[in-house]
Image (tube, grey):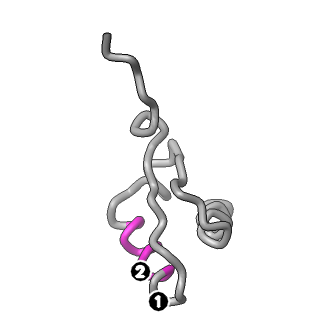
Amino acid sequence: MEDCRHIAIATIHKADVLASWNFKHIVNLDRIRGYNGVNLKNGYAALEIRNPRELLNYDKD
């Protein structure tokens, strides 16, 4: 239930990206497609869901 609440809050508040380490319930391609299907069906935008490592920019030099 907490995972659903996390996604719903991010969706309603129009977050650009939701970052999570929860690979079982949140950062999972099949589930992301499902969440975004529900969002689009209900008039919300698709939510970008990533793990935090994908969002960090390290200086390559």
Q: Is residue 51 magenta?
A: no
Q: Residue at x 53, y 89 (%)?
A: 42
Q: Picture quarter containing residue 9? A: bottom right
**Which residue: 67% across, 67% down?**
13
- Reading the image, the residue beneath label 2 is 37
**For the residues marked 2 and 1, what is the alpha-carbon distance in whole angstroms?**
6 Å
Q: Badge 1: few (under 14), some or many (20 or more) residues near its Cα, within 10 Å?
A: few
Q: Residues within 10 Å of mark 2 (few under 14, many from 20)?
A: some
Q: Position of residue 53 (x, y in %)?
A: 43, 34
Extent of the magenta region: 31-39
Tags 2 and 1 touching, CB below 8 Å: yes
**Badge 2 amino acid:** Gly
Q: Amino acid at mark 1?
A: Lys
Q: Quadrant of the C terminus?
A: top left
Give the residue at x 48% y 65%: 47
Would you say 43 lies left or right of 28 here? right
Compare residues 24 and 42 and report the one nearer the observer: 42
Query: The N terminus lies in which quarter of the figure?
Result: bottom right
Q: Is residue 36 above or below residue 29?
A: below
Q: Which residue is mark 1?
A: 41
Q: Judge whether residue 37 is colored magenta.
A: yes
- Most frequent secondary structure within the magenta stretch: helix
In this view, 61 is above or below 11: above
- Residue 55, above or below 59: below
Residue 54: give x, y in percent of width and height: 39, 38
- Snapshot quadrant of residue 3: bottom right
- In x, y percent, where is residue 49? 45, 56
Q: SS of the residue at dot 1?
A: helix
